[in-house]
Structures are given as structure tokens and as C-alpha cells.
Image (cartoon, helix red, strand yellow):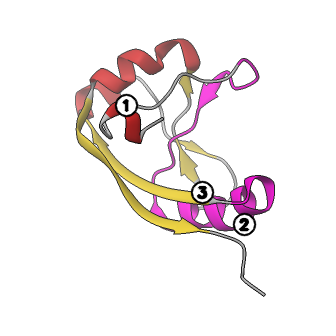
Amino acid sequence: MVEASGWRAWPPRLPDQPIFYPVLNEDYAIRIARDWNVPASGIGHVTRFEVEASFLDRYPVRQAGGETILELWVPAEELEEFNRHIVGRIELVRTFRPPQP
């Protein structure tokens, strides 16, 4: 869905996903993609993107665990506006799949 947007927008959240959680460092994103998403979905992606800093001021940085586990909590109903403030394109950085036997 991100690719279908021209790599410029995140898709709407599903009904059971009331929050969009962009994480703020690549190490944490790698752990989510590799350790959570691959077992749950069979694939995990790490992306990178920029958002206008003045827009992000409305979302406090949340520490969701350890010192480097930092994320923003964007309500699903604000995601369309969030997407309008993305600068440039969303970049695919890494893809993880299950190990091959």
C-alpha cells in the first residue's frame, strides 16, 4: 500500500489499530521488523521517512520500554494529515524474511 501511494503515504489503520506508531531509531525498527513482524506475518520491513518538524511538535516522544525504544503515537484519525506533512518519499531500508532451511 505504501508503494502504491508512490512511497508518499501510510495506509489507513485497520479498525483494531487506533494508533500509528512511527519509531524514532533504526535499531528499534529493525528489532520490530525482524523479531515481531517476521514471526507474525512472514515478512518485516524497515522504512525511513522525514516529517516536517513543526508538525511533529504536536506528538510528544514516548519511551515505550528501554532508553532507545522511542516512538510517536499518532491517532488513526490524524494519519491522513500526518501523511500530508511527510517530506519526500518513504524509503525502504531493509526487508527481513524467515531463514531459509
Badge nearest the viewer, 2 or 1: 1
Residue 34 falls in image quadrant: bottom right
Q: Which secondary structure lies at badge 2? A: helix
The residue carrying pointer 2 sits among few (fewer than 14), some (14 to 19) or many (20 or more) residues within 10 Å by Cα, namely few
Whichever of callouts 2 and 1 sits on the residue coming sooner in the sequence is 1
Q: Which secondary structure lies at badge 1? A: loop
Locate residue 18 relative to residue 71 in the image: left or right. right
Q: Which residues are magenta?
A: 15-42
The residue located at (33%, 40%) in the rendering is 7
Whichever of callouts 3 and 1 sits on the residue coming sooner in the sequence is 1
Looking at the image, residue 78 lies above or below residue 10: above
Q: Residue flagged by tag 2: what amino acid is it? A: Asp
The residue carrying pointer 1 sits among few (fewer than 14), some (14 to 19) or many (20 or more) residues within 10 Å by Cα, namely many
Locate residue 36 relative to residue 93 in the image: left or right. right
* Residue 100, numbered circle: none
Q: Residue flagged by tag 3: what amino acid is it? A: Ile
Question: Dot 2 corresponds to which residue?
Answer: 35
Is residue 75 covered in magenta?
no
Percent from the top left, x then y, of residue 88? 20, 40
The residue located at (72%, 80%) in the rendering is 99
Q: Residue flagged by tag 1: what amino acid is it? A: Ala
Whichever of callouts 2 and 3 sits on the residue coming sooner in the sequence is 2
Residue found at the far bottom of this picture: 101
Residue found at the far left of this picture: 88
Q: Which secondary structure lies at badge 3? A: loop
3D distance between C-alphas at marks 2 and 1: 25 Å
Question: Dot 1 corresponds to which residue?
Answer: 9
